[in-house]
Amino acid sequence: MTLSVTIDHRLGNFRLDIAFESAGGLTALFGRSGAGKTSVINAIAGLIQPDNGRIVVDGTVLTDTRNRVFVPVHRRRVGYVFQEGRLFPHLTVRRNLVYGRRFAPDAGGMAEIDQVVGLLGIGGLLSRRPIHLSGGEKQRVAIGRALLARPRLLVMDEPLASLDEPRKAEIMPYIERLRDEMRIPIVYVSHSIAEVARLANNLVVLADGRVAASGAPAAVMSRLDLFPLAGQPEAGAMLATTIAGEDARFGLTVLRTAAGELRVPHLDLAVGTALRVRIRARDVMIALVRPEGLSALNVLPGTVAEIGAADGPVVEIRLDCAGEPLIARLTRRSIETLGLLPGRPVYAVIKSIAFDSHAFAGTLPGGGGGADADMMLG
């Protein structure tokens, strides 16, 4: 399933001028508030008719201003999940779900409802009304209602923004299952780097109504110039890893990466499980020689690939660790003292305690093995 979006549209003094393509999976639109993320998905859903643009989903043209094509909202088959569930308060969960079937191209049977109920884990909620649901439960029901309309594409506008951390942790695995099992392309709006790192197959960074970067999340997130544009206080890189084994004596799990092994607090996952790990720039120290007599357990050899702009006392540098990116945040004084320049061999030192394992579950897109899980650490 492919998605191609080109939009040139003026909203008051704000101009949206973007173009990107996606090969399916979950495409995250990421950026600070006011970057134009919601306007993009509103154009995809048909809630905005752009001044100029073309939107195509798997060969079906939804908008083409040059050829005067604009498919109305009710015929687009684009499911929309808002920040709040927007359920009908007077209907039970079951009747809210059944309402979604009214917009399907043909009526499905009970098996279809049972599949969606099972996918989202809402079987015990069917007789309740929305007032008796938690925020996470409401969002799962809203997703189910959208799915039962049999959309060709699902757009989600910051669906976790109104939830507290426990509710976010509750619903995240269901979004992962939706991404991996339903095979419906998703355009997911977020300004949370944790959500993007965990969920996205494709990442589009928006800044001031334009695409600042687009591509695989690991490649995009390793760019030093994007985090100020996206309103993030600091950078961080994402590593592809697999569970290699356990250090049972000390309660640690060993992760294998192309750059070397990492030891992190114990993870109850099978050997071979594929994980993504995000390591924050502030958690990486740099040494010129392999350190000895150090409490930090994780030392990865690498090469300085890029040194960011020195706009203040702190500078971010990108390392190439056997093809895997790492980002470190150092003072300008440290960079000068160590004599760091692009091409210089170094060692990246990461404390095991820097890894925060409170948010992990689901499947790594394109990964697998064992009890597959997707993990966003740090």
Image: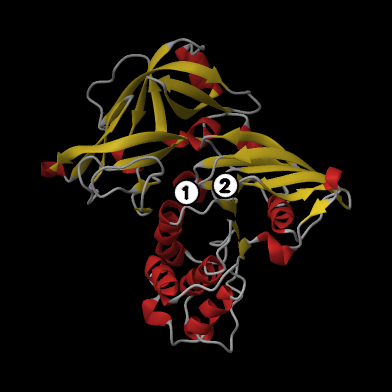
Left or right: where 114 falls relative to 269: right
Q: Amino acid at mark 2?
A: Ala
* Residue 326 seen from this side: yes
Distance from Cα at disc 1 to Cα at disc 2:
8 Å
Residue at (47%, 80%) from the top-left corner? 133
Residue at (25%, 32%) from the top-left corner? 295
Q: Nearer the viewer, residue 246 or 292?
A: 246
Q: Please name the residue that numbered disc 1 is placed on.
A: 199
Q: Residue 230's image quarter? A: top right
Q: Quadrant of the image for the N terminus?
A: top right
* Residue 8 seen from this side: no
Residue 344 appears at what percent x and percent y? Answer: 44, 10
Which mark identifies residue 177? none
Q: Is residue 369 above or below residue 260?
A: below
Q: Are marks 1 and 2 in contact (CB under 8 Å)?
A: yes
Marks 1 and 2, the one that precedes in the sequence: 2
Q: Is residue 11 above or below residue 222?
A: below
Residue at (55%, 40%) from the top-left corner? 23
Left or right: where 143 falls relative to 32: left
Residue at (39%, 16%) from the top-left corner? 346
- The structure's colour scheme is secondary structure
SS type, badge 1: helix
Most extreme residue toward the right is 12
Q: Nearer the viewer, residue 191 or 373?
A: 373
Q: Is residue 356 above or below residue 125?
A: above
SS type, badge 2: strand
Q: Please name the residue that numbered disc 2 is placed on.
A: 28
